[in-house]
Amino acid sequence: MKARTLAAILAAAIAFSATASRAAEYRIDPGHSFVQFRISHLGFSWMIGVFDKISGSFAFDPAAGPGGQKISVEIDTASIDSGHAERDKHLRSPDFLNVRKFPRATFVSTGYEGNANGGTMNGNLTLMGVTKPIAIAVKKTGEGNDPWGGYRTGFEGSVTLSRKAFGAGRSLGPASDTVHFFLSIEGIRK
């Protein structure tokens, strides 16, 4: 009887350990995460750039289903880099992102629909003092042990937004209102 009880306790502990090892809080690795954007330049060509200073955290718990997934991200708006210093200076100015007044953009999730491999992350984006709900299509790109003794999980996502909806800069014509974003987020388990 005691042997069966001990075996049951050990089996439960192993099952809990396997579940707990997959359920985790992660710190976003700023050196391996970025937000890339693409916008039409007056309808003639594409301007591509990146916000390369981001921070935050996320929870990834496949066993918990959609309720176990969440994320909070902060983007340093002054970290915009389009590969052209004068243009970046203009993009940081009050004509566009007004980074002195609005130094950060944030995204805080409100819910997730999907499975452990991908789905839709819903949440609130705050940009230039305006908060609006958005939905980001996401998918897991990988997870596992890193060479330094840590455990990492990575995701990518995409969303298309209207600059006008957030008051982000002067009008450059209808082709330049839509901005396409690609996100690459890598987290280190805490």
Image (tube, rainbow, N blue to C red):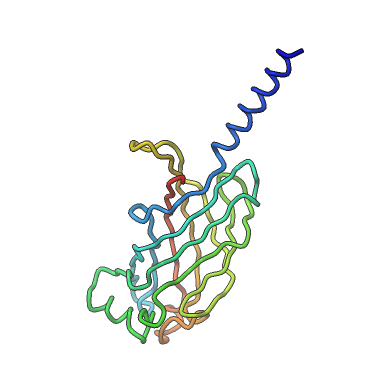
32 vs 56, left or right, is: left
Task: Count the labels in the image.
Answer: 0
Q: Is residue 38 above or below residue 112?
A: below
Task: Name the outermost residue toward the right.
Answer: 1
In this view, which residue lies farthest toward the left?
A: 85
- Identify which residue is drawn at 65% across, 45% down: 64
In the figure, residue 51 lies in which quadrant? bottom left
Residue 176, how many percent across, how many down? Answer: 42, 78
Q: Determine the image quadrant of residue 152.
A: top left
Residue under the image location 57 percent in, 55 percent down: 70
Tell me which residue sits at (41%, 67%) in the image: 75
In front of the other: 10 or 147: 10
Relative placement, left or right, of 145 versus 80 is right
Kindly give the residue lying farthest to the front in the view shown: 2
> At which x and y percent is residue 88?
28, 75
Q: Is residue 36 above or below residue 22?
A: below
Q: Position of residue 119 (x, y in %)?
A: 59, 52
On-image quarter of the N terminus: top right
Residue that appears at 44% across and 81% down:
168
Residue 78, placed above or below residue 122: below
